Amino acid sequence: MGKVEENKLQKEQNLMDTAFSLFSSKGIARTSISDIVQQAGIAKGTFYLYFRDKYDLQEKLIIHKSEQLIRHALTCSGFEEQDTPSDKIITIVDDVLDQLRRNPHLLRFIDKNLSWGIFHRAITRSETDYLALFEKLLSWPGGRSQLEMTVYMVLEFVGSTCYSVILDADPVDLDHFKPYLHRAVRSIMESCLSAS
Amino acid sequence: MGKVEENKLQKEQNLMDTAFSLFSSKGIARTSISDIVQQAGIAKGTFYLYFRDKYDLQEKLIIHKSEQLIRHALTCSGFEEQDTPSDKIITIVDDVLDQLRRNPHLLRFIDKNLSWGIFHRAITRSETDYLALFEKLLSWPGGRSQLEMTVYMVLEFVGSTCYSVILDADPVDLDHFKPYLHRAVRSIMESCLSAS
Amino acid sequence: MGKVEENKLQKEQNLMDTAFSLFSSKGIARTSISDIVQQAGIAKGTFYLYFRDKYDLQEKLIIHKSEQLIRHALTCSGFEEQDTPSDKIITIVDDVLDQLRRNPHLLRFIDKNLSWGIFHRAITRSETDYLALFEKLLSWPGGRSQLEMTVYMVLEFVGSTCYSVILDADPVDLDHFKPYLHRAVRSIMESCLSAS
Amino acid sequence: MGKVEENKLQKEQNLMDTAFSLFSSKGIARTSISDIVQQAGIAKGTFYLYFRDKYDLQEKLIIHKSEQLIRHALTCSGFEEQDTPSDKIITIVDDVLDQLRRNPHLLRFIDKNLSWGIFHRAITRSETDYLALFEKLLSWPGGRSQLEMTVYMVLEFVGSTCYSVILDADPVDLDHFKPYLHRAVRSIMESCLSAS
DNA sequence: GATGAATGAGCATTCATTCAT
DNA sequence: CATGAATGAATGCTCATTCAT
């Protein structure tokens, strides 16, 4: 990679990091492009060499962060050979929760953004075929559509409940919530698999 | 009620209805106060007699619509005497889903807004004690904290999954989704009740 | 005086007092008619029954306060029979300074407003012939135009110097300033009287 | 200096000149930023690249004009070697009065603004040490604090009296006023110097 | 007389976007 | 490629004033 290319990537990363920090703390609506470039120490015009506008950056940021989150969960979770699919998915979910607990900024940012819609886009646009990855990783016993449905429901369920649990310990804190969550995830999976 | 008071209520309602329509179609960020008052046929200054700013209106709107939604579900759903709490809550959930299917604008507006946070505020600020209402209506066999947890999880689960299902039939359409949903809700409730 | 008349005077006084308080603390530019009527507990429309606008009120207020200030100085200062005109005017000046020291709000309000221009208007519009009063009180030995000039110069001098002296003790505090002031006033008077 | 830098200075000067003209003729309260930029032929947003708001511009303008006024008086007045400090200060005062007479706009603008407060700020912020300059120029025989006091009193006295004299010839015109002024200034100086 | 809801012109301020350097 | 001065449309908000009750 040429030095110029490297420099460009570094600038882009700088802008994304700065934007992430600002989006997390002030919210997207209250963050202006001026804020971002000023904080990043880059000229205003330069922004437009990398992103079409604020929302273009936001989208790239969400995809980037989502993929990072998923990739970590899939690659860093240690599975035992004899684990059932339910066990495995719970291991994955717990890893995600741990990541988010350690990084509340990230949680606040993706907030409700880590939804099916974004995930779907991330899956389809990404070079990685995540569904296939899931299928293999989980030793998924059912069909593709059941897998898709399962991922959808678990994803939405975990994503929507963990926000206030992690950030505000409301209605209970994460450690008290996990047993409920595990049981709910297991039964969601069962309900999916038992569908003919 | 005096004629003036009546007129004021009508003006406020007019503003809220207009804003709801615009928020739903263009999104809140892209709706300006100018848009609202112009559409409502009301002077700009008048807006500020009723709302502090756009977000004040938004909040009032969310609470208003949420309460309407819940109230309809609680009062219009017909329960049988012998229904279990799970049966009853599924009846309620189905009523909510039907309302949202018939009124996609409403769904798009409250989007992910009908979350625990808003609901919690609606519950506490409201003159109605919704938790007590639930307790009585469901003939709830467990404790208050279990009830609160159950409501939280079901609420978040239904709220987060139904969006793309109803609006985009993604990953499946509502009729195909309901069986999964029902089973998931039942198991969530069981997992809550079985917690000591 | 009828009860209605009385009520009107009371309303006007209420408005003027409230406005004075607000003008003093926030400045005239930053005080709106809304502020005034709200603080006074009076309806907005009522304001216009008493004053044309904010600046009408301001002018009336300045004249009112100026006259009060002067009247006190002229009536409450005790002169000795053998006092020279210079002695007497210094007694008057000191009384004014004492009033202002005790009431910094008043000083801040009339700030630089107690100028010749306002005083001139106060003199001419007022039912009291202040120049004649001065003439008699001071046993003024010279002509009318000399008296007018003297009053003008002393007034402007005292008015312009005392502001920062009283409020900020800058460049020195009032007690240290008085000797200078007295000497300056005496010499100003002499320079006026010695003009043929 | 780069072409860009030059252009910026020119824009700032343009804005200040235009604002000065408008402030003088309509008053600050009645001059809007829209007025200024329109008259200056500059885009609205550009204003905020140079000034925080209207009052920021006003302050910079006052300091700028005050310094100009003082500098002219100090450098352009011709002193004779044998002049006393009183003679010299009267020469300076007369130069200032002449400047103001020739430029009533300036007088109206700085109105009562050329007060100790502003002057003090101008002195302290300025790179020039004005008090030292005075000390040397006047061959001042007394101490620093006496000098400060003298400058304060003369400044306030001249500043406050000349306004209506020059602009309205009230109570007399400038030529008739000068003899009084000179005598008063001399005696103020004497009263300051004679203080131990 | 008194009220205060309604008005809408007017203002300050922000900000995405462009383009000459 | 990078810059940042300049733009001006767009927006939120204020406020003096009116007028039906």
Image (spheres, coloured by chain):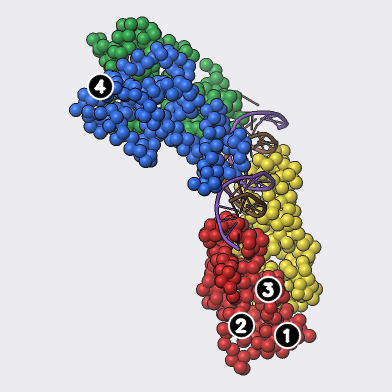
Chain colours: A red, B yellow, C green, D blue, E brown, F purple
Q: CA distance from mark 3 to mark 1?
A: 25 Å
Give percent across and percent down for residue C118.
Answer: 46, 20
The residue carrying mark 3 is: A122
Q: CA distance from mark 1 to mark 4?
A: 111 Å
The chain under label 4 reads: D
Q: Which is in the foreground here, disc 3 or disc 1? A: 3
Taking the spot 66% from the left edge, 77% from the top edge, the residue there is A154
Give percent across and percent down for residue C52.
Answer: 58, 24
Give percent across and percent down for residue C5.
Answer: 55, 19
Residue contact at pointers 2 and 3, CB within 8 angstroms: no
Q: Which is in the foreground here, disc 2 or disc 3? A: 3
Which disc, if any, is residue A193?
Answer: 1
* Nearest to N terminus: mark 3 or mark 1: 3
Judging depth in this view, the residue of D188 and A151 nearest the camera is D188
Q: CA distance from mark 2 to mark 3?
A: 15 Å
Taking the spot 43% from the left edge, 13% from the top edge, the residue there is D173
Asked which quadrant contains residue C105, the reply is: top left
Asked which quadrant contains residue B61, the reply is: bottom right
Which disc, if any, is residue A74?
Answer: 2
Judging depth in this view, the residue of C98 and C43 nearest the camera is C98
The residue carrying mark 4 is: D82
Is residue D3 visible to the viewer in this orientation of the structure? yes
